[in-house]
């Protein structure tokens, strides 16, 4: 009897660490699937025209689970800690505006069928690997997420193993080395102004 109880206790202890991870994995999958379905519903049939209100709604759904500050901080590298809080806030705001605008460049990509291949959760971080298939073309799409309070937020995305944050990091560092941070900020101001007009 004691041995049976002890065995059950050991099994519970062995299973317990995997339960929160599984719960988080299911939570992340549901969040991304719900987002995907909401985007597809708003997109409707291919080739349709969208009002500005519909485009704004799409931007919100696509981008509202992205942690722009975390992505912007990585993209800027060590320079982020060397600039003032005011400059940091402006940089993050411009960065977010540009990413939100770019997200509507090719709306058809959001019509892809998505297969969730792997979701790995470790504490407050998660890696999601998916395959997006559109017109018989299969593209690996990955997400790196971090839990912020009660919500999981995307801090990086990879398409065909190319990281969004790393791509911006290379662009920004090249400009900073050649012309300095002020030149980068001015360039982002111009790009953001075009995005909002």
Image: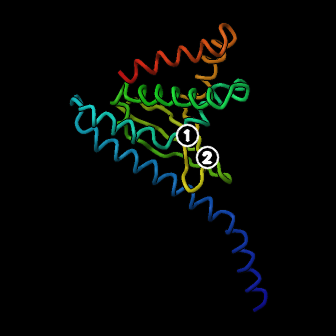
In the rendered view of the protein, which quadrant contains the N terminus? Answer: bottom right
The residue tagged 2 is 146
Q: Residue at x 46, y 28 (%)?
A: 97
Asked whether residue 41 is in view, the answer is yes
Secondary structure of residue under mark 2:
strand
Q: Position of residue 50 (x, y in %)?
A: 24, 31
The residue tagged 1 is 67
Q: In the rendered structure, which disc, 1 or 2, sits on the residue that comes first in sequence? A: 1
Q: Nearer the viewer, mark 1 or mark 2?
A: 1
Foreground residue among 97 and 137: 97
The reply to whether discs 1 and 2 touch (Cβ–Cβ < 8 Å) is: yes
Residue at the top extreme, as displayed: 178
Q: Position of residue 38 (x, y in %)?
A: 34, 46
Q: Is residue 19 above or below residue 159?
A: below
In which quadrant of the rendered view does residue 86 lie?
top right
Q: Residue at x 28, y 42 (%)?
A: 42
In the rendered view of the protein, which quadrant contains the C terminus? Answer: top left
Q: Residue at x 47, y 25 (%)?
A: 98
Q: Position of residue 10 (x, y in %)?
A: 75, 75
Foreground residue among 20 and 7: 20
Q: Is residue 45 left or right of residue 69?
A: left
Q: Is residue 185 left or right of residue 112?
A: right
Q: Is residue 176 left or right of residue 57?
A: right
Residue at the bottom extreme, as displayed: 1
Q: CA distance from mark 1 to mark 2?
A: 9 Å
Circle count: 2
């Amino acid at each position: 009897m004691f041995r049976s109880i002890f065995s059950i206790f050991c099994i519970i202890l062995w299973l317990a660490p995997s339960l929160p991870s599984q719960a988080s994995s299911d939570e992340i999958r549901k969040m991304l699937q719900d987002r995907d379905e909401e985007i597809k519903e708003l997109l409707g049939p291919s080739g349709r025209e969208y009002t500005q209100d519909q485009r704004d709604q799409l931007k919100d759904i696509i981008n509202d689970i992205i942690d722009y500050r975390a992505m912007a901080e990585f993209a800027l590298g060590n320079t982020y800690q060397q600039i003032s809080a005011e400059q940091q806030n402006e940089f993050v705001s411009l960065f977010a505006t540009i990413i939100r605008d770019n997200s509507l460049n090719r709306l058809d990509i959001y019509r892809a069928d998505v297969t969730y291949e792997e979701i790995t959760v470790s504490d407050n971080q998660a890696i999601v690997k998916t395959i997006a298939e559109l017109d018989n073309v299969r593209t690996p799409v990955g997400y790196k997420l971090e839990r912020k309070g009660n919500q999981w937020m995307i801090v990086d995305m990879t398409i065909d193993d190319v990281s969004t944050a790393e791509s911006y990091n290379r662009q920004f560092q090249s400009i900073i080395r050649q012309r300095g941070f002020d030149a980068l900020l001015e360039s982002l101001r111009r790009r953001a102004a075009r995005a909002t007009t």
